[in-house]
Image (tube, grey):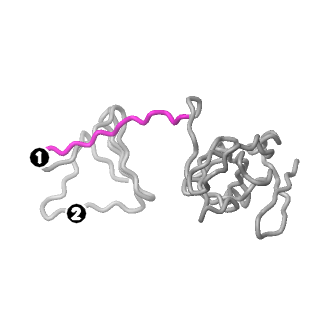
Amino acid sequence: MSYLKINIPKRAQEKVSISPQGTHPASFLSTALKQSTPIDFHSSVTGRLLGMIDDGQIPLVSWSEQEASVALPARSIVDLRNDHVGREVLLMFEQADQSRPIIIGVLRTKENRPQALVPLEVRYDGGRVLLDADTELVLRCGKSHLTLRQDGRVEVYGETIVTRAAGANKVQGGSVQLN
């Protein structure tokens, strides 16, 4: 197991285990060539997500314009996953303080774009809502769900199933089986 020593502002130094998913070349930690123009820390900066510590709660980032070549802990306004480690991120800085980065997004490339979602068509037709599915439609809530299948089968699951009717409560079928 390899260890990476990082500087954490206003805290003691720690050694952080790099998990197999988070192992990346040490070149991520070294600063790139300094740009000749000073950076405006009120605007966004492109950086890199180097890893996550504290069970994925604290992301570690670096960017080419930072003063020291260390991984800094950051906050994030987006949900981060292990597969984001090593990817470019968009950073802003709290109160323009470069020791306080905030991840505002994970940048996408052709290779890591999410697959297109199939659009869900919901129609309102004269007082009723219509949802169409090709093979199966599932409504799920907690421990219960209702499944409608293409072959006509309807399944109702739940801890307790209650039917009520002001008039007759009918159960009809080719055959009716109880217990």
Seen from the viewer's position, the closer of residues 33 and 22 is 33
Q: Which residue is at a point 61% across and 56% down the rendered structure image?
A: 41
Q: Which residue is at a point 58% across and 34% down the rendered structure image?
A: 112
Q: Name the residue under label 2.
A: 164
Residue 15 location (% of width, % of height): 85, 58
Residue 13 location (% of width, % of height): 84, 64
Classify residue 108 as left or right of residue 143: right
Outermost residue, front side: 37
Q: Residue 126 carries which label?
A: 1
Mark 1 and mark 2: span between their CA atoms?
A: 26 Å
The mark lying in front, picked from 1 and 2, is 1
SS assignment for the magenta stretch, majority: loop
Vertical comparison of 10 with 126: above or below: below
Residue 116 is a magenta residue: yes
Report the span colored magenta: 113-126
Q: What element carries label 2?
A: loop
Quarter of the image where one finds residue 118? top left
Vertical comparison of 10 with 60: above or below: below
Q: Which residue is at a point 58% across and 45% down the rendered structure image?
A: 106
Vertical comparison of 122 with 171: above or below: above
